[in-house]
Image (tube, rainbow, N blue to C red):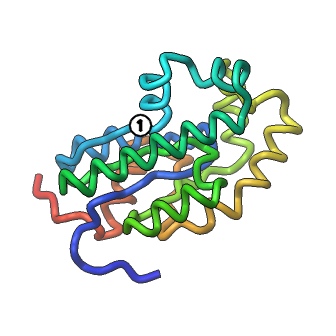
Amino acid sequence: MTISARPAPLVCLIGFMGTGKSTAARLLARQIGWQHVDLDKEIVEKTALSIPAIFSRMGEPAFRKIEYQQLARLVGESIESRKPRIISLGGGTTAQSANVALLRQNGAVLIWLRCPADELFRRCARITNRPLFRDEASFRRLYEERLPSYELADYQVESNIEPLRVVEQILALSIFPKVTA
């Protein structure tokens, strides 16, 4: 897909759990002077519940509805304020077609932080707050199920490296105004 030369006002980092979306988005936003918003943190803030608590109390369908509502709010705020924004999405956000449609309709650029499943499993095995991470078999099955939604991204960068190198790859995509050091 060809992206126009003018800067994209809304850039979303997508990928499976553990790819480093939040870290890379925070570093990228700081470097280029854009606002960073973490969708999962917004959900937690608006519901006053952790993501695992939402899943256990309300179920995944209710979580996905909340996720869509918060994503729509963030996209709307970005458009209304006309301030460029980087949003780090949850691992399953783009697996929901309504979310992808919302992002596409509003000109968002999607960047997939790609990382081998073995490395992601290693990273996520130590994290206890992942509601869909139960065991290695279900982890790998979920990874395979979500791959097609990540492949819809406008760009892909490797995230099996230090976060600052991930940011360098994203900046090399030439979708942001030139940053001078």
Q: Quadrant of residue 88?
A: top left
- Label 1 element class: strand
| Type of amino acid at the residue the image marks with label 1 | Asp
Q: Position of residue 78 (x, y in %)?
A: 27, 52
**Residue furthest to the right:** 137
Residue located at (39% from left, 59% from top)? 169
Q: Position of residue 9 (x, y in %)?
A: 26, 61
Q: Nearer the viewer, residue 119 or 53?
A: 53
List the residue tagged with mark 1.
38
Q: Position of residue 39 (x, y in %)?
A: 45, 38
Q: Is residue 10 above or below residue 90?
A: below
Q: Would residue 30 appear left or right of 48 to someone viewing this image?
A: left
Q: Position of residue 107 (x, y in %)?
A: 37, 68
- Residue 166 visible to the viewer: yes
Q: Nearer the viewer, residue 77 or 22?
A: 77
Residue located at (63% from left, 41% from top)? 64
- Residue 127 visible to the viewer: no
Residue located at (28% from left, 48% from top)? 77
Q: Quadrant of residue 152?
A: bottom right
Q: Nearer the viewer, residue 21 or 98?
A: 98
Q: Residues within 10 Å of mark 1 (few under 14, many from 20)?
A: many
Q: Quadrant of residue 63?
A: top right
